[in-house]
Image (cartoon, rainbow, N blue to C red):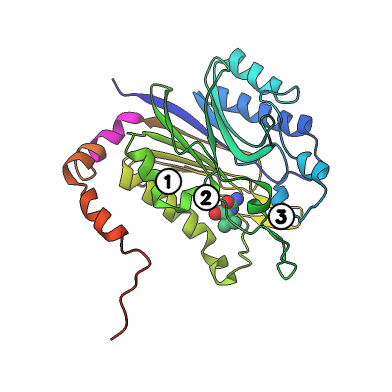
Amino acid sequence: MPRIVTVGAAQLGPIARAESRAQVVSRLVALMRQAKEAGCDVVVYPELALTTFFPRWYMEDQCEIDSFFEREMPSAETAPLFALAKELGIGFHLGYAELVQGGTRTRRFNTAILVDKSGAIVGKYRKVHLPGHAEHEPHRAFQHLEKRYFEVGDLGFPVWRSFGGIVGMCICNDRRWPETYRVMGLQGVELVLLGYNTPLHNPPDPGHDALGLHHNTLVMQAGAYQNGTWVVGVAKAGLEEGVMHIGQSQIISPSGETVAMCSTLGDELAVARCDLDRTVPYKSTVFNFARHRRPEHYQLISTRVGAIPPAD
Ligand code: CDV
């Protein structure tokens, strides 16, 4: 029996700064209903899916900053999403800014959760690879202050048994790092869910701008193939508060091939029937880690990282 998980990549178009949580949740609800009609088992929303991508602005007022964060999940505003998931019997993945109070200090993370078909949270991931900078850089066309507003995630890259398979999560910039997929690959991951907010313009090196879509597909296809896993990458796309973001949300098979992709920069659902058993030929042959990986050699090499041999 094939193990089919029908996945909906629920791309979002821009979210304006003035848009309320209730307005955004109603967009998420519409996509969830569409996903159910398309036969989806799980619907995947982007990174920071409840607000505009606020790290583009330098802010000092902590109240203003905290207005973009969620103090609980579900909250009064997001409860309709959980209720609908339970009613329809569909799971979801949601990215949001998480504020954790308690102990001696307040902590803030760029977070994603996995919710099962009963509406229960079964997994949480906090973004590890935070791109950008911590201080105001006025020379940029726009800021990318994730290092100012978030701490590095403290949960590692766990995987969960859910939807009949082994599911992992990462967030946006994490998808560019091979370690992200490999840590989950070593735990047997079969389905990686991730959201992204990727500006078309890269202020530190505009030379990348023409390659944004290529790099997006390249890293997710490589991560899928090299670890024999499905990868679902979902964008917040389009012109948001004056900044253009890439779309091309896509579902990638363990062969590294993209099998479904969004074609607009707005709210759009791309659907694929993902047979988790298609991971097996990759995990048992070319990427049979137990047989073919050579970690003892990686160890030797890693002690020399940074020690570039002197020029002749
Ligand atoms: N939200 C992100 O992590 N964005 C980064 C940008 C800044 C390059 C990304 O990797 O897409």
- Residue of label 1: 180
Q: Is residue 181 magenta?
A: no
The mark nearer the N terminus, 3 or 1, is 3
Quarter of the figure with the N terminus: top left
For the residue marked with disc 1, what is the amino acid? Thr
- Residue drawn where x is 49% and y is 23% of the image: 41
Quarter of the figure with the C terminus: bottom left
Instruction: Give the Cα distance between marks 2 and 3.
Output: 17 Å
Q: Which residues are magenta?
A: 276-282
Regarding ligand 1, which quadrant of the image does it lie in?
bottom right
Q: Secondary structure at mark 1?
A: helix
Q: Secondary structure at mark 2?
A: loop
Q: Decide if residue 240 is in sight here.
A: yes
Residue 103 horizontal/vertical position (percent): 66, 30
Give the prevailing secondary structure in the magenta stretch. helix
Judged left or right of residue 296, residue 202 is: right
Judged left or right of residue 185, residue 66 is: right
